[in-house]
Image (cartoon, rainbow, N blue to C red):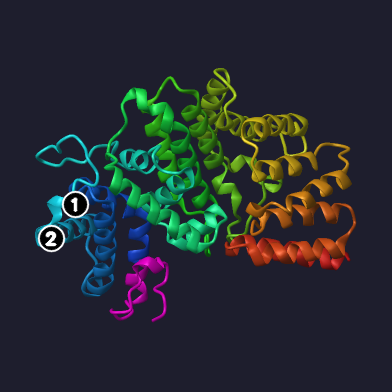
């Protein structure tokens, strides 16, 4: 059966007929907006991640089957009710459940089972327990909090789909075996998990900022990340890095409307109409980033500093690129990842009087990094530098490679325009 438009393959069994396109779109929207809310509600009821995820998925499948007869006024509420009913039925049927649970242990639930504002954050902290490997923490959070398919998780982490699936499975088994609790950690436990939680919240935002598929941005994911960052700041008001992360996300959000034209085409930061930036979000973002930098230079504070240099510059041309490079130099000391190295090389290429041949050599060396083998931004950066060096044939080849690696249709069109312009110039 053909995959339903927008519905994750994880939710696409072959046993039901295709839903009308309108219904499929509504279910897709509900999945984006309500997945984590529904899942958290079922986890709170069952304390079992696998059971909660299965019942949440089944609720969306039921929506595809039944909504053609009438779409409910409150899709999210309908899905939550159905998922919880499915979970209760499963729990009643499984006579050996008591021997398997609690897979997730917590203080007794309030009798009325009232949803708590921190519930999404509880699930993030559960996924980021120190007993889990870091790569499994990230993969599991993207799957459960964002509802991303295994393929989307793999694309976001630059790994293969089987590897992503294995990490998610291992993490769930570890949570069950270790009886990892579904709760916000005690104060003394927070430092051991903070960096992992910040990382996954940032990755949630990244997954939405440039999404796979036809849309450039998935505002459900970016909005969820901002909400989680705000919860972290309220939970740990005296910590610098949550403030820095929130500042970084807000400054990025502020530029959202200027990222695309009215026709939906990508606009790079260099060409954006800065009058379209959200001044309120910018002001809050800069304020939070500044406060964080005054208390230290963690990796999110440094990333926020880079964003701040961009948004406070009068124009792209007047950006202090040397200072941007210094921020990336500092990041390479505390967080020496291939992507940071790529961003540093790209920034170096924009410093007035830059030695572009040297920058190109840096980019070529990064091509040996396994994590960047399928990363479209590396050949795109090479193409830009090659074009500025006048090596248009090589630039065109690099653009073609970037196009093949790009999962977003808006970015693919942008790169295709760049390729066409390069071919004309050649």
Could you say where residue 291 lies in the image, as x and y percent from the top left? 53, 21
Q: Earlier in the sequence, mark 1 or mark 2?
A: 2
**Residue toward you, 200 or 77:** 200
Could you say where residue 309 lies in the image, as x and y percent from the top left? 67, 31
Residue 100 circle label: 1
Residue 331 visible to the viewer: yes
Nearest to viewer (mark 1 / mark 2): 1
Q: Main secondary structure of the magenta part?
A: loop
Check if residue 12 falls in the magenta segment.
yes
State the image quarter where residue 127 is shown. top left
Q: Report the residue at 68% width, 30% height from top.
A: 327
The crowding category of the residue bearing disc 2, from other C-alpha atoms within 10 Å (few below 14, some 14 to 19, many at least 20), is few
**Quadrant location of the C terminus?**
bottom right
Could you say where residue 268 lies in the image, as x and y percent from the top left? 67, 50
State the image quarter where residue 304 is shown. top right
Residue 94 circle label: 2
Residue 7 visible to the viewer: no
Secondary structure beneath dot 1 equals helix
**Quadrant location of the N terminus?**
bottom left
Residues in magenta?
A: 1-25
């Amino acid at each position: 059966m053909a995959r339903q438009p927008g519905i994750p393959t994880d939710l696409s069994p072959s046993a039901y007929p295709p839903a009308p396109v309108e219904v499929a779109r509504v279910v897709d929207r509900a999945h984006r907006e309500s997945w984590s809310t529904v899942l958290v509600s079922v986890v709170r009821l069952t304390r079992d991640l696998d059971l909660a995820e299965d019942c949440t998925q089944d609720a969306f499948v039921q929506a595809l089957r039944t909504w053609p007869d009438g779409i409910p006024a409150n899709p999210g509420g309908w899905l939550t009710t159905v998922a919880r009913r499915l979970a209760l039925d499963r729990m009643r049927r499984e006579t050996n459940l008591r021997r398997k649970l609690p897979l997730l242990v917590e203080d007794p639930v309030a009798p009325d089972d009232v949803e708590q504002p921190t519930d999404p954050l509880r699930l993030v902290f559960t996924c980021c327990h120190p007993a889990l490997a870091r790569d499994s923490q990230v993969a599991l959070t993207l799957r459960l909090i964002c509802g991303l398919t295994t393929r989307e998780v793999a694309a976001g982490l630059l790994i293969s789909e089987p590897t992503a699936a294995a990490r998610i499975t291992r993490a769930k088994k570890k949570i069950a075996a270790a009886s990892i609790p579904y709760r916000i950690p005690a104060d003394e436990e927070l430092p051991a998990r903070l960096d992992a939680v910040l990382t996954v919240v940032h990755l949630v935002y990244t997954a939405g900022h440039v999404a796979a598929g036809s849309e450039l941005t998935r505002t459900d994911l970016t909005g969820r990340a901002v909400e989680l960052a705000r919860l972290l700041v309220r939970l740990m008001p005296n910590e610098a890095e949550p403030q820095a992360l929130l500042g970084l996300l807000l400054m990025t959000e502020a530029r959202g409307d200027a990222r695309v034209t009215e026709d939906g085409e990508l606009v790079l930061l260099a060409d954006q109409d800065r009058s379209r930036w959200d001044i309120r979000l910018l002001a809050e973002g800069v304020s939070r980033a500044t406060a964080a930098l005054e208390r230290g230079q963690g990796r999110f504070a440094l990333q926020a500093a880079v964003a701040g240099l961009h948004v406070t510059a009068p124009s792209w041309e007047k950006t202090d690129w040397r200072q941007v490079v210094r921020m990336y130099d500092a990041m390479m000391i505390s967080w020496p990842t291939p992507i940071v190295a790529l961003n540093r090389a790209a920034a170096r290429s924009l410093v007035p009087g830059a030695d572009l041949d040297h920058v190109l050599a840096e980019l070529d060396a990064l091509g040996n990094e396994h994590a960047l083998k399928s990363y479209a931004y590396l050949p795109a950066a090479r193409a830009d530098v090659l074009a500025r060096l006048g090596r248009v044939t090589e630039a065109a080849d690099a653009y073609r490679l970037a196009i093949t690696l790009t999962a977003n249709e808006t970015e693919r069109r942008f790169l295709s325009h760049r390729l066409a312009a390069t071919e004309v110039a050649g």
